[in-house]
């Protein structure tokens, strides 16, 4: 039995439509996967940013403490040098 030309053309169009639909579904799945991946990356980067912020704050705090200690040591060294000079002057040094 031979198919009528209209039925053959309809089947060809149906095959093309199904192929186009499958391609559209595949693209949509790829986009969904891509969005999911991007969301995961964004969450990971946000967590890393938070960790880096915490580390930076800790480093800044330590730097401020070291600077303060440096000022205090410098002050004490200056005072000690003045004491040594005073003692030397008293003893004819």
Image (cartoon, rainbow, N blue to C red):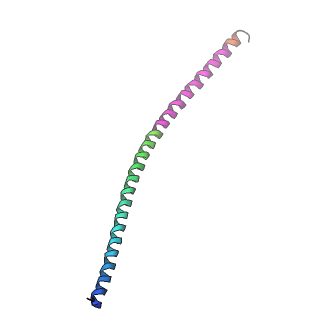
Question: In the image, is 66 to the left or to the right of 93?
Answer: left
Image quarter where the C terminus lies is: top right
Residue 36 shown left or right of residue 60 in the figure: left
Quarter of the figure with residue 32: bottom left
Q: Is residue 83 magenta?
A: yes
Q: What secondary structure characterizes most of the magenta part?
A: helix
Name the residue furthest bottom: 5
Q: Quadrant of residue 78?
A: top right
As for residue 40 lying within the magenta part, the answer is no
Q: Which residues are magenta?
A: 57-86
Q: Residue furthest front?
A: 1
Task: Write the residue at 61% across / 21% down.
Answer: 77
Residue shown at the point (58%, 21%) measured from the top left: 76
Q: Quadrant of residue 16?
A: bottom left
Counting every numbered tag in the picture gives 0
Residue placed furthest toward the top: 91
Image quadrant where one finds the N terminus: bottom left
46 or 39, nearer to the observer: 39
Nearest the eye: 52 or 16: 16
Front-lying residue, 22 or 43: 22
Q: Is residue 2 above or below residue 64?
A: below
Front residue of this view, candidates 49 and 87: 49
Residue lying furthest left: 1
Question: How far from the left and from the top, in percent, is residue 27?
Answer: 37, 68
In the rendered image, the vertical position of residue 2 relative to residue 75, given as above or below = below
Q: Is residue 54 left or right of residue 2?
A: right
In the rendered view, would you say 49 is above or below 71? below
Residue 58 at x, y percent in the picture: 46, 36
Residue 3: percent from left, percent from top: 27, 88
Q: At x 37% / y 55%, what residue is drawn?
A: 39
């Amino acid at each position: 039995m031979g198919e009528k030309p209209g039925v053959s053309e309809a089947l060809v169009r149906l095959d093309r439509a199904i192929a186009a639909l499958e391609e559209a579904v595949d693209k949509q799945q790829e986009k969904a996967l891509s969005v999911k991946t991007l969301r995961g990356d964004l969450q990971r980067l946000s967590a890393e940013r938070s960790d880096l912020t915490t580390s930076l704050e800790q480093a800044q705090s330590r730097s401020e403490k070291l600077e303060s200690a440096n000022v205090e040591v410098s002050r004490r060294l200056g005072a000690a040098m003045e004491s040594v000079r005073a003692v030397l002057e008293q003893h004819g040094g």
